[in-house]
Amino acid sequence: MKPKATLLVIDDDATLTRALEIYLIRAEYQVHIANNGTEGLRGLYELRPDLVVLDVMMPQLDGWETLRRIRDMSTTPVIMLTAHGQEADRIKGLRMGADDYVTKPFSLKELEARVDAVLRRTKGQEPSKANRVLYITDDLVIDSERWEVQRHGERVDMTSTELRLLFYLAGNAGRVLSHQQILAEVWGPEYVDNVDYTKLFVWRLRQKIEPNPSRPRYILTERGIGYRMEPA
C-alpha cells in the first residue's frame, strides 16, 4: 500500500521517536527518524519529505537553528514540538516559519491529527477561487493559477499555508474577514479558537509583501474583528 505521505521526525529522544515511528507507520505514513538537527537537515535534502516534525530542545543544533536552516532551503511544512506552557516558544516557532506546533506532553493521536490537518491544507489542494490572477497592483501580483506571488517582478518564497491565507484574503479583497472565518477556511474548523495563528501568519505575510510592514498597505487590521485586504 502506498503511504499517505513521507514524514521526517527530528528529535533526540529515542523513546519518543520509536513510539512515533511505530504509531505513524500504522497510520499509513512513511517515517524517517533523525536524532539531531544536522542529521535532520541531511535527511531533508536527501528524502524531500512531505512534512517535518521538529523538536525544539536538542543539543548542538537546536530546533530554532534547524528551523531557520530548513526555511533557508525549503518550504516543507514543519510542526514544532514545544515544551508545556512555553507560549513564547510557540510564537517564536510560528514567526520563524513553522506551520503548526504540538505541546509536550502530547498524545500520539493528537500529533497524528495535526499532521493530517497540515498535510490537508498544504499538499497541492488549491483554493476554490483558483485559475486566475486574484490581485494585481504596480508592484504585487497574486496568481492562484500559477500558485505564486510576485513582488516587483520577483517570485516571493512562501509556504503553502501562507499562500492559502493570502489567496483567501485577496479573493475577498475589500471585505472584512473575522479571525474565525479565516481560521475555518485556511486552517480548518478545528482551529477556530487559535487566533494567534491569524495574527502571526498575517505578520509573516506583511514581512514578505508590504513595502513597510509596520504601516501595511495591503493587509489591514480591523481591530477586534480580523483583517481586510485593501482592494487592488
Image (tube, helix red, strand yellow):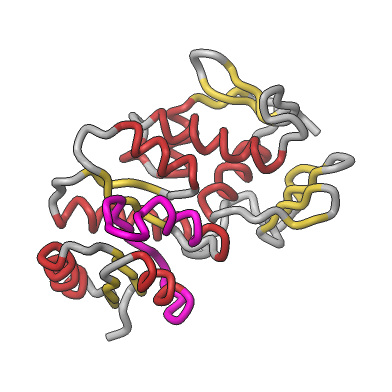
Q: Is residue 105 above or below residue 34?
A: above
- Compared across the picture, whether 218 is left or right of 59 comes to right
The magenta segment is 45-70
59 in the magenta segment? yes
Q: Would residue 86 be seen by someone viewing this image from the given angle?
A: yes
Viewer-nearest residue: 78 or 85: 85
Q: Residue at x 14, y 46 (%)?
A: 105
Q: Would residue 5 be seen by someone viewing this image from the given angle?
A: no
Q: Residue at x 89, y 41 (%)?
A: 138
Q: Is residue 81 above or below residue 214?
A: below
- Location of the N terminus by quadrant is bottom left
Viewer-nearest residue: 98 or 225: 98
Q: Residue at x 63, y 26 (%)?
A: 228
Q: Residue at x 35, y 38 (%)?
A: 90
Q: Is residue 113 above or below residue 91?
A: below
**Residue 63, position in %: x, y?**
36, 54
How many circles with numbers are drawn on the protein?
Answer: 0
Q: Is residue 140 above or below residue 52?
A: above
Viewer-nearest residue: 126 or 156: 156
55 in the magenta segment? yes
**Residue 142, position in %: x, y?**
73, 48
- Compared across the picture, whether 215 is left or right of 14 comes to right
- Location of the C terminus by quadrant is top right
Q: Quadrant of residue 208?
A: top right
- Compared across the picture, whether 18 is left or right of 167 comes to left
**Residue 130, position in %: x, y?**
65, 54
